[in-house]
Amino acid sequence: MLITLDISNEEFDAVIGDIEITPVIFLDFPSDIRGVYEFELLNSVVNIFHFKDQILSQGVCLDDTVLIFGKMKVRIEKVKGADFELVEGDYHTGRKQYHTWSYTLNKGDVVCTCVGSLSFLADYCASIYIVTESNPKITLTFDTEETVPYDTTNPNSTKYGKSKVTKYEHTSSPGKLFDHEFFQEHLKIGRIVIKDEKG
């Protein structure tokens, strides 16, 4: 079952927890980040303690669970801009690259921070500081089928959570459409597929 939590009035970093497992972050890189920005987190922990009423109002009972672990989608509205850092290798000594979607800070603006391994590049860590206008709407959406209760004080719970880590596999092999013969056989020229793929 899908659950959406409005976390607008909470400190973003306090909601998205930190454990021994590094989350994987799936970011979008638009030319203009203003307005609504969405991204996905995998292998992340969310503190749901202050959102019990919201969860119950959606018809879900999570007992005494305080933390959940799994996959979630983050949606942030009223975005003004952001600062992005990409680190190759070790976070402290690796090569760093930056990008800024320009913004001007005003009193009352909100800054949301998120850090994780970058989904599509092995050995890269991404950090993003997202600047919003005051009183932004920030939501987390997750599927109860893709999350597990997580209790940092219970060794069995942490062991179970770690066993549920989703490994995001990178490959050195190109996708099928980079295979010239496959492309020619199924598309010839252009973008309309002219032949079913076998298998």
Image: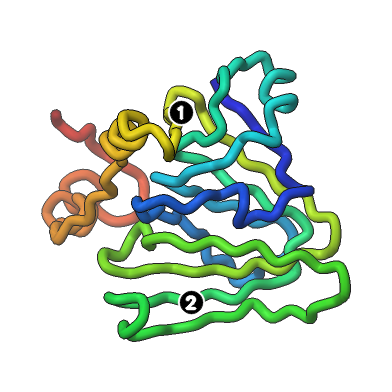
- The answer to which of 68 and 126 lies nearer the viewer is 68
Tell me where residue 170 sits by quadrant. bottom left
- The answer to which of 170 and 94 lies nearer the viewer is 94
Query: Helix, strand, or loop for circle 2?
Result: strand
Q: Position of residue 20 (x, y in %)?
A: 35, 52
- The N terminus, quarter of image: top right
Give the residue at x 60% y 80%: 100
- Disc 1 designates what residue? 149
Give the residue at x 70% y 36%: 50
Left or right side of 36 for 70 = left
Q: Is residue 50 shown above or below 77?
A: above
Tell me where residue 112 sits by quadrant. bottom right
Mark count: 2
Q: Residues within 10 Å of mark 2 (few under 14, many from 20)?
A: some
- Going by the numbered disc 2, the residue's amino acid type is Glu
- The answer to which of 172 and 52 lies nearer the viewer is 52
- Disc 2 designates what residue? 85
Colour scheme in the image?
rainbow
- The C terminus, quarter of image: top left
Circle on res. 162: none
Q: Tell me how far mark 1 sits from mark 2, CA to CA.
A: 31 Å
Left or right side of 142 for 124 = left
